[in-house]
Amino acid sequence: MSKRQQIAAGNWKMHKTFLEGQGLAQEIRTMSESELTNGAKLLIFPPFIHLQSLVKQMEGSAIGVGAQNINEHEQGAYTGEISAAMLKSIGVQYTLVGHSERRQYYNETNASCAAKLTAAFKHQIIPVYCIGETLSEREANKHFDVVSEQLAALKVLSAEEMSSCIVAYEPVWAIGTGVTASAEQANEMHIHIRKTIATLFNQSIADAVAILYGGSVKPDNAQALFSMSDIDGGLIGGAALSSRDFINIAKGF
């Protein structure tokens, strides 16, 4: 059994009004406290409007609260953006960096992700660094190369920072499509990711880093995915909007 932290992370994306978010978070907390006995770590990544209230709502629980994005600059004339210092000031502990939707729709690059990783750690916020290839990249047999290039952004981190960083592999072709990489396909990439991290840092850091799989994770496929040697949990989208599905996925460890 892996000694790595097993993590179920829920990315709410652009869903839930203020009251709906409070309700969902409360259900997740209540269910996790009464049903979850396997030591899995739960993280939730709601839209920005929820962060301050959900940090308070989760006080005294084991559930971590994170932002879906972070700006790489300390402060300044960046209308619509939110800095690491602002997030830290309301108790946010985690942030997503480089989610495929951010890369696809908002032109985030490996270089901008590297800057965001640096900004997060400067303010003691743990990043979940998201990587993954598109369908055309996989069909062209470039998926390992694409992921290796994305992982190179981690070189800005110190060994100590990398030890607490979380990586999430999300094949773009499996996000929100209902298509899941097979457990074997996913694990093959997770092994490649761990080898690449060992090359960038060292083997003991690579062995300790939690690597999550994202892309249509559901209660009925979670157990098969989580039983793989190098899959340490899930970054869950649609199913994280149902407290029952989210908890059932977390029971899959």
Image: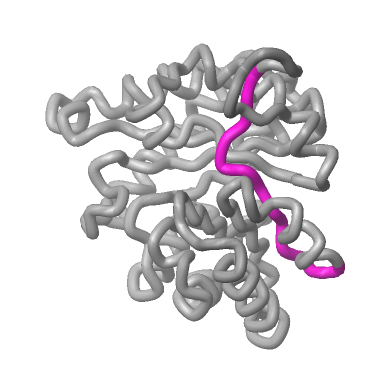
- From this view, report whether residue 228 is shown above or below residue 67: below
Looking at the image, which residue is at 67% across and 75% down?
Answer: 26
Residue 79: percent from left, percent from top: 60, 22
- From this view, report whether residue 59 is shown above or below residue 148: below
Q: In the image, 182: left or right of 155?
A: left
Q: In the image, 140: left or right of 168?
A: left
Residue 43: percent from left, percent from top: 63, 57
Front in this rendered view, residue 236 or 38? 236
Looking at the image, which residue is at 50% across and 53% down?
Answer: 11
Quadrant (top left, top right, bottom left, bottom right) of the N terminus? bottom right
- From this view, report whether residue 117 is shown above or below residue 27: above
Q: How is the image coloured?
A: one colour
Tally of numbered discs: 0
Q: Within the image, what quadrant is residue 104 found in?
A: top left
Front in this rendered view, residue 76 or 208? 76
The overriding secondary structure of the stretch rendered in magenta is loop
Q: Within the image, what quadrant is residue 107 found in?
A: top left
Looking at the image, which residue is at 51% across and 12% down?
Answer: 111
Region of the chain picked out in magenta, as a range: 60-72
Residue 103: percent from left, percent from top: 39, 27
Q: In the image, 39: left or right of 1?
A: right
Residue 69 lies in magenta, yes or no?
yes
Residue 209: percent from left, percent from top: 63, 40
Quadrant (top left, top right, bottom left, bottom right) of the C terminus? bottom right
Looking at the image, which residue is at 69% across and 54% down?
Answer: 65
